[in-house]
Amino acid sequence: MHFRKVSGFNRGILFELLSDAYSFDSRWQECCGADWKEFDDFFFDNPRIADRYGFITVLNGKPVGLASWDPRKMPEYVEIGHNCIISSHKGNGYGAVQLREALRRIAGQDAGKIVVTTNARMLPARRMYESVGFNVCGTRGNESRTAFSGDYVDYEMMLP
């Protein structure tokens, strides 16, 4: 497993990885597909940002995941953005390895802490965040008008 710059791939790969990772429930694509496309377009329109604040995880020459983060609130904190592994590679620990690499990179960017939010129903994601050292710092009701239910769980990790 290794990590490559986003700019080394073709436009559309981020959308493709997110679509595959959330393919277990078609409502995700219906709800978030436009946002995923916008994210893909932004990173490919801004390759310097993409390569500094994200990467693609590659296994055996094939892209299997992505991690990204938003630095706009530094030095107070950095927020983990899209972080996913494609369906065929879930459950093998690759997500935690990918997240640790993102944390390593973020730690070198002078942030005071790292925050991330996930849906309370996303138990594998919650276990992964907790396994690498994130602590729950709060929950919020899901007030979106999407077909999804479940509160949001906010996590944080203080950096030295």
Image (cartoon, rainbow, N blue to C red):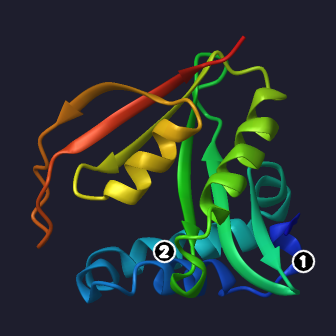
Disc 2 packing (10 Å; few <14; some 14–19; many ≥20):
many
Q: Is residue 35 above or below residue 99?
A: below
Q: In the picture, which quadrant includes the N terminus?
A: bottom right
Q: Secondary structure at mark 2?
A: helix
Residue visible at 18% across and 36% down in the picture = 140
Counting every numbered tag in the picture gives: 2
- Quadrant of the image occupied by residue 132: top right
Residue 139 image position (x, y, % from top left): 21, 32
Q: Residue at x 15, y 67 (%)?
A: 148
**Residue 116 picture location, percent across and down:** 46, 39
Residue 121 left/right relative to 90: left
Q: Which mark is residue 115?
A: none
Kindly give the residue lying farthest to the front in the view shown. Answer: 92
User: Image height check: is 26 above or below 113?
Assistant: below
Q: Quadrant of residue 8?
A: bottom right
Amino acid under label 1?
Gly
Q: Residue at x 71, y 44 (%)?
A: 100
Q: Is residue 71 left or right of residue 8?
A: left
Provide the secondary structure element on which disc 1 rests. Answer: helix
Quadrant where the C terminus sits is top right
Q: Residue at x 22, y 57 (%)?
A: 121
Location of mark 1 (residue): 8
Q: Pointer 1 and pointer 2: residues touching (CB < 8 Å)? A: no
The answer to which of marks 1 and 2 sits earlier in the sequence is: 1
Q: Residue 36's mark?
A: 2
The residue lying toward the viewer, choosing from 109 and 40, is: 109
Between 62 and 49, the residue placed more toward the observer is: 62
Q: Splitting the image into 4 quarters, where does residue 24 fall? A: bottom left
Amino acid found under the numbered disc labelled 2: Trp
160 sits left or right of 23 in the view: right
Distance from the alpha carbon under mark 1 to that under mark 2: 19 Å
